[in-house]
Image (cartoon, helix red, strand yellow):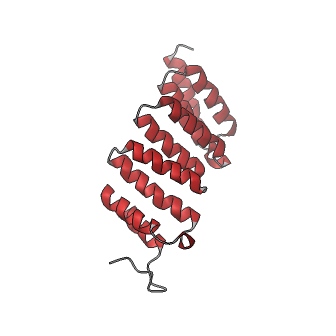
Amino acid sequence: MPPMNHASGDSIPEDYLRLALRSAEPEMRMANARAGLAFPEEALEEDTKVLLLRQIYIGELELHHFRAAIDTASQMVAVGPLKDIALHDRARAQQALGDVAAAIASQRMAARHAPVDRRSFMLWSLATLQHFFGDVEGALGTLDKALLIAGEDRPLLKAHFAYICLENDE
């Protein structure tokens, strides 16, 4: 039986989002999210659609279906809202498949699309990928950019910068 909206007696996409968020099993998370996405386009707000797609993406990651997760994250990007989060998610799945160049490109786009309050985090994530895959110069340069706009995460960015320098005798 579908969830019911207490105000109108009808189910709405957000009811399925709530169920997906509360699902302990990836298969149930994805089923609830797909049920929410089955509503007519006019019943789906863009942000709700992205959040439902993200629940499918999370389920795919949990099941190690990384190619499907990349496709779902790309659908999230196409919807519009939270584009930086969707691009970051796509980068995670690309990295899991070992597609370093694609992961770095997606994370770089995530940083470009991020609102100011998330931009230093997205740059930090890019620097982490660059560092992990051996681009020390790129990682330090990206961390420099992130430090220019950092807020509360500034000490963590400085620590990561110092770690890279120490690790590479710089």
Relative to 58, is 105 above or below?
above
**Spot occupied by residue 59 in the image (x, y as percentages of width and height):** 37, 53
Number of disc labels:
0
Q: Quadrant of residue 66?
A: top left
> Where is the N terminus found, in terms of image quarters?
bottom left
- Viewed as shown, does residue 7 lie left or right of 147? left
- Residue 93 appears in the picture as rendered: yes
**Residue at 53% over, 43% down:** 88
**Spot occupied by residue 129 in the image (x, y as percentages of width and height):** 51, 31
Relative to 26, is 44 above or below?
below
Which residue reaches farthest right? Answer: 148
**Residue at 44% over, 86% down:** 9
**Spot occupied by residue 167 in the image (x, y as percentages of width and height):** 49, 18
> Where is the C terminus found, in terms of image quarters?
top right
**Spot occupied by residue 19 in the image (x, y as percentages of width and height):** 38, 68
Relative to 156, is 71 above or below?
below
**Residue at 41% over, 80% down:** 4
Which residue reaches farthest bottom? Answer: 8
- Residue 120 appears in the picture as rendered: no
In the image, 37 versus 9, the foreground residue is 37
**Residue at 52% over, 62% down:** 49
In the image, 98 versus 155, the foreground residue is 98
- Viewed as shown, does residue 70 lie left or right of 123? left
